[in-house]
Image: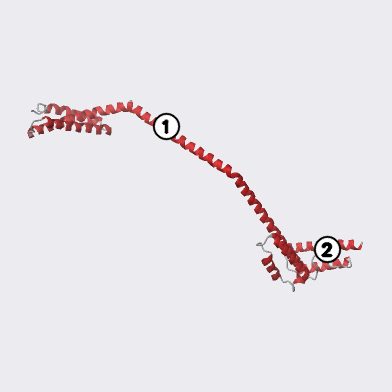
């Protein structure tokens, strides 16, 4: 059987192929997609022609087959040139018509997915916020109760501390008032040890108050007085003389101004109380 391409005029195909290749190269220069598809079509055209020649020929003549290959190359080149010319135009039309519609559809679907995703995230955020608010609302009474309990504990501790400090202050002032009389019977170091061992903050205010009363009784006994009793005076002059001596002794002690002022105030209050008691007893 004769070759399918045995009668093909090689030169009649070569000139148009060169023209198509030249023009097509200019058209496809900036369109890589059209160039790729053109090469694929031309390659397919070449393989198809060779395959048909092999399948339809009775025997393969090397000379005739080489001519067929050459002709197939020229035809494939012509197809490549035509594709380079036509495909950019077709792709451009596609992108401006169907492609533009497809792109708009894709953009619409993409934006729709984004809106749905944002809506879903917003719903989850609102649900989470509602759950947090419900949890806070549920725990609010408990938190308020804990806060009130903490405030009560704080006030209780402050009151306990204030009472302990008041007891220590009273004992210290009583000792300072009679420091000269007590210096041989109750030394300051011993008083400090009482404060540290028995009147410290580790004990409750009630316990410190009870022990403070015992300490004041001990100081009074060291002075030769009964707890809560006052010295007996026969006249107002004796009272004035006694407290004048007390003030002189206090002023000779090395106390700071605030402590001296506190002791002087305490002496004045005691003097005034003794004067009232003396006057009420003798009138």
On the rendered structure, is 60 left or right of 189? Answer: left
The quadrant of the image that shows the C terminus is: bottom right
Identify the disc placed on residue 276: none
Colour style of the rendered protein structure: secondary structure
Q: Which residue is drawn at the image coordinates 49% and 39% (left, top)?
A: 125
What is the spatial separation of the Cα atoms under label 1 and label 2, in whole angstroms? 95 Å
Height in image: 128 above or below 53?
A: below
Q: Which residue is drawn at the image coordinates 25% and 34% (left, top)?
A: 36
Q: Residues within 10 Å of mark 2 (few under 14, many from 20)?
A: some
Height in image: 220 above or below 37?
A: below
Residue 239 % position (x, y): 85, 66
Helix, strand or loop at label 2? It is helix
On the rendered structure, is 27 left or right of 280? Answer: left
On the rendered structure, is 232 left or right of 167? Answer: right
Q: Residues within 10 Å of mark 1 (few under 14, many from 20)?
A: few
Q: Which residue is drawn at the image coordinates 14% and 27% (left, top)?
A: 13
Q: Quadrant of residue 4?
A: top left
Residue 158 % position (x, y): 67, 56
Q: For the view shown, which residue lies furthest in the right direction? A: 283
On the rendered structure, is 96 left or right of 149? Answer: left
Say whether residue 251 is visible. no
Which label sits in the foreground, 1 or 2?
A: 1
Between 200 and 12, which is closer to the camera in this rendering? 200
Residue 263 % position (x, y): 77, 63
Identify the disc placed on residue 271: 2
Residue to which mark 1 is pinned: 112
Does label 1 or label 2 sit earlier along the sequence? 1
Helix, strand or loop at label 1? It is helix
Between 188 and 261, which is closer to the camera in this rendering? 188
The quadrant of the image that shows the N terminus is: top left
């Amino acid at each position: 059987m004769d070759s399918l391409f045995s009668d093909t005029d090689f030169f009649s195909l070569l000139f148009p192929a060169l023209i198509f290749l030249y023009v097509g190269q200019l058209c496809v220069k900036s369109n890589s997609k059209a160039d790729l598809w053109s090469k694929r079509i031309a390659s397919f055209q070449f393989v198809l022609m060779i395959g048909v020649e092999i399948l339809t020929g009775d025997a393969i003549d090397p000379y005739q087959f080489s001519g067929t290959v050459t002709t197939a190359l020229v035809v494939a080149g012509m197809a490549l040139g035509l594709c380079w010319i036509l495909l950019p135009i077709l792709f451009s039309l596609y992108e401006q018509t169907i492609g533009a519609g497809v792109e708009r559809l894709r953009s619409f679907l993409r934006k729709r997915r984004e809106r749905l995703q944002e809506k879903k995230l917003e719903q989850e955020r609102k649900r989470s916020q509602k759950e947090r608010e419900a949890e806070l609302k549920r725990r609010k009474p408990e938190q308020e109760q804990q806060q009130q309990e903490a405030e009560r504990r704080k006030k209780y501790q402050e009151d306990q501390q204030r009472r302990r400090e008041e007891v220590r202050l009273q004992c210290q002032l009583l000792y300072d008032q009679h420091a000269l009389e007590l210096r041989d019977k109750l030394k300051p170091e011993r008083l400090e040890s009482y404060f540290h061992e028995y009147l410290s903050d580790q004990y409750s205010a009630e316990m410190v108050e009870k022990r403070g009363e015992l300490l004041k009784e001990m100081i009074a006994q060291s002075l030769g007085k009964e707890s809560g009793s006052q010295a007996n005076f026969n006249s107002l002059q004796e009272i004035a003389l006694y407290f004048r001596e007390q003030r002189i002794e206090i002023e000779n002690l090395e106390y700071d101004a605030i402590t001296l002022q506190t002791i002087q105030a305490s002496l004045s209050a005691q003097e005034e109380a003794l004067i009232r008691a003396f006057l009420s007893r003798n009138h």
